[in-house]
Amino acid sequence: MKKKEWIRLALVVGVGILFVIVLLGVMSFTRKRENIDYTEDPSVPEEIKFTNASDMTESEIRELVEEKRINLKNFFHDAQYYNIGDVSEDHTSEDNDDYMVVNEDFLNELKTLLSSRAYDDYYQYMAEIEKRSDINIKGTLYMAPRDLFDRIYITSAIPSYDVSEEYLILESATNERIKARENIKLCNDEGICSRDDVYELDLVKEEDTWKVDEFLTLID
């Protein structure tokens, strides 16, 4: 047999052996894969199916919830707080680290945004103070713990800090109550998120007005 024929034969045999090796490897991997028990990732929640028993459409409900959420967020973003040592007749600057002051207009507007239950959760910590005679602030002034509203700006459904993405998830709706969730994320340009939290975001109707009833509860 000529040399070229031997080389051609050797190539054919080599290719055949290589094909058999690859085939056996694929068959072995397939058998191993069949023995693996693939289950759904437990960290992925089941899809929430929105149930609507109200007279509104889903788009109207979504628009309503988002409007109320943004109104409340803007309210706290623009809120004005006073140092108690600057406005109180009975306190000094030494009390500034412990107490802040809000005016009557602040509470009146907050009352239009929150349900009576949610509003009372804050009002119970308020106490009327006597303002200094040289302070030009209309209405009654109220003192409150300095950190009373702190978590609203970070750990709530309306954060102003540590957030890059927000997603509204509707759960259920009637003509009296709407249950929803707000997904708060903090992600970089590569899509890596250091925060992925979900908070309850519920509305209730009181005296024909929709108000935010819950926005602080973190859902595990």
Image (cartoon, rainbow, N blue to C red):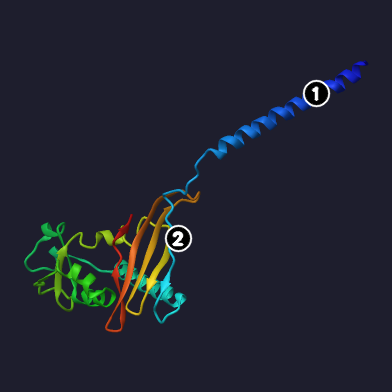
Residue position for label 1: 13
Question: In the visual, does 192 lie left or right of 143?
Answer: right
Q: Quadrant of the N terminus?
A: top right
Residue 122 x/y as whole percent = 19, 68
Q: Residue at x 22, y 67 (%)?
A: 81
Q: Where on the picture, by quarter, is residue 101? A: bottom left
Q: CA distance from mark 2 to mark 1?
A: 55 Å
Tell me the kind of residue under disc 1.
Answer: Val
* Element at label 1: helix
Residue 203 to residue 10: above or below: below
Residue position for label 2: 47
Q: Quadrant of the C terminus?
A: bottom left
Residue 38 x/y as whole percent = 50, 44
Question: In the visual, does 13 lie left or right of 117?
Answer: right
Residue 193 x/y as whole percent = 43, 50
Mark 1 neighbour density, 10 Å: few (under 14) some (14–19) many (20 or more): few
Residue 121 x/y as whole percent = 19, 67
Tell me the kind of residue under disc 2.
Answer: Glu
